[in-house]
Image (cartoon, rainbow, N blue to C red):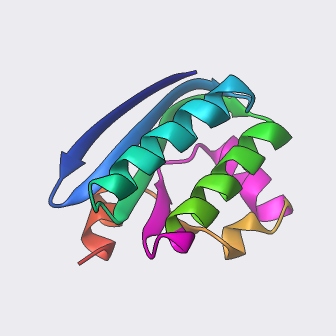
């Protein structure tokens, strides 16, 4: 998995690419979130548009990221999940935990 970050309209965007399988990827995501929190960045969007697959460890990684942001008084939203990943979020009932948006643009607008 590859991780990259950028910022648009005061929202920190974390782009995930490839297969989200947890493990070292979870550590990398956690490190990025803590750096954002240190910089007082409280609005985070995880863009899944380039993610091919995700396993249960990948889901756990996203849950941990959400918890980290909430504990810091921030928000974390998810955008552009493929139909396959969106189905996974629905089946596991995580679609009721995360705010999901079809596009990054719509997610960014929702922070306002």
Which residue is at the front of the view, 45 or 106?
A: 45
Q: Residue visible at 73% across and 39% down?
A: 58
Residue at the extreme left: 9
Asked if one can make out residue 73 in the rendered structure from this viewpoint, the answer is yes
Q: Residue at x 74, y 65 (%)?
A: 94
Residue 90, percent from left and from top = 76, 63
- The stretch drawn in magenta includes residue 71: yes
Which region shows up in magenta? 70-91
Quarter occupied by the N terminus: top right
Q: In the rendered image of this protein, does residue 13 appear above or below residue 15? A: below
Count of all numbered marks drawn on residues in the image? 0
Residue 51 vs 9, above or below: the answer is above
Is residue 101 at least partly visible in the picture? Answer: no
Nearest the viewer among 53 and 28 is 28
- Give the position of the C terminus as an image quadrant: bottom left
Point out residue 46 in the picture as x, y percentages from the top left corner: 46, 49
x and y percentages locating residue 50 in the rendered image: 48, 30
């Amino acid at each position: 998995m590859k991780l990259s970050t950028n910022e648009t309209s005061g929202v920190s965007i974390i782009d995930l690419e490839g297969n989200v399988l947890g493990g070292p990827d979870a550590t990398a995501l956690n490190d990025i979130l803590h750096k954002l929190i240190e910089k007082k960045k409280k609005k985070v969007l995880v863009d899944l548009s380039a993610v091919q697959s995700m396993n249960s460890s990948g889901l756990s990684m996203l849950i941990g990221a959400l918890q980290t942001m909430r504990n810091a008084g921030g928000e974390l939203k998810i955008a552009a999940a493929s139909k396959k990943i969106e189905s996974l979020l629905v089946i596991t009932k995580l679609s009721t935990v995360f705010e999901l948006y079809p596009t990054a643009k719509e997610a960014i607008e929702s922070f306002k």
